Amino acid sequence: MNFEDCLVSAVNASVKAGNEILNIYNDPDSDFSVEKKEDNSPVTIADKKAHQTILENLENCGLPILSEEGIHSDYNQRQKWDYFFLVDPLDGTKEFIKKNGEFTVNIALIHKNIPISGVVYLPVLNLLYFAFKNQSYKIENKELKNFNDIKEILSISEKISPETKPENYTIIATRSHQNDELKKFIEDKKKVYNDLDIISAGSSLKFCKIAEGSAHIYPRTGYTMEWDTAAGHAVCTGAGLKVKDFNTGKELKYNKKNLKNPYFIVE
């Protein structure tokens, strides 16, 4: 398996899926009807079309694909996977429905329970983040065509780093899922830092924002699944950050029997 070729396929898949989403998002006559899945989370036709597009564009890698919108293989089968793609075709469906633009396409490459590469694409902003060989990058304000190789991608990319942070201690938090635990976390930080700022964002954009230094910490004290976090986790790791279990401090693991994440902190 060629990791570079698989990353190129993931970048191309994310952009093509993003275009499918935008076609629906920008069409005033589009079907924005929302269905409820078994876990009560919303799903739209955009989620489904993006999922299908990603499957078609990743199949050349020959790896298993675990997608939020696909059929979830039994753990007895999944635990044998050495490498696989973990995909959220439209992360931030609530943001998509609200039309605030803060939704992403997430594609991560997992090896032995760890995200080793990842792509996060924001279609509305034409902004793409990715992790490759222990470094993270972004492509901003560039034409995102169908790339042929990694050199093409890197030639229009810039490295990102969290080294330069805001002057005030800054927490980045979820826009749609604030709860009592998060409020307590913020209140506790206020006791330590007199000058404290809070910024909000939807979807895995929060991972990318902290990876490029927009905040000092990202606490998540709410419900997430592995496909919500894996690509952003890879971007943060490439930028030198840790994505840790809120209670144990251990790095988040993937391809667990139960695909639900614990509460976590990125810093």
Image (spheres, helix red, strand yellow):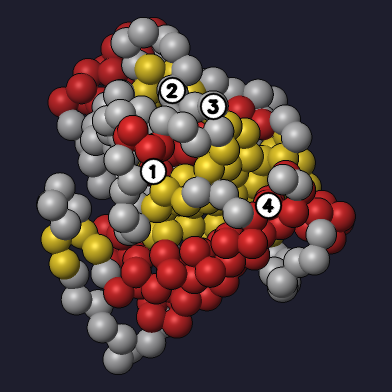
Tell me residue 107's x, y (percent).
52, 50
* x and y, in percent, of residue 221 in the image: 27, 27
Look at the numbered disc 4 and give the secondary structure of its residue.
Answer: helix
Residue placed under numbered mark 4 in the picture: 6
Quick one: SS at disc 2? loop
> Which residue reaches farthest bottom?
29
Looking at the picture, does residue 94 appear above or below residue 172? below
Vertical order, 125 against 163 (above or below) = below
Which one is nearer the viewer's eye here, 245 or 38?
38
Mark whose residue sits in front, 4 or 2: 4
**Amino acid beneath label 1:** Asp
Crowdedness near tag 2: few (<14), some (14–19) or many (≥20) residues, C-alpha within 10 Å: many
Local crowd size for mark 3, using a 10 Å CA cut-off: few (<14), some (14–19), many (≥20)? some
Mark 3 to mark 1 CA distance (whole Å)? 18 Å
Q: Position of residue 219 (x, y in %)?
A: 37, 26
Q: For the point 23% across and 41% down, which residue is it?
A: 177
Q: Which mark is residue 112?
A: 3
Is residue 56 shown to the viewer in this render? yes
Question: Given the image, on which type of amino acid does mark 2 rest?
Answer: Leu
How far apart in space, not on screen, are marks 1 and 2 (Cα)? 12 Å
Q: Secondary structure at mark 1?
A: helix
Instruction: Provide the residue designation for mark 2.
Output: 252
Q: Amino acid at mark 3?
A: Lys
The CA distance from mark 3 to mark 2 is 12 Å
Name the residue at 15% across, 47% down. Answer: 39
Q: Quadrant of residue 218?
A: top left
**Numbered badge on residue 228:** 1
214 above or below 156? above
Q: Is residue 165 left or right of residue 43?
A: right
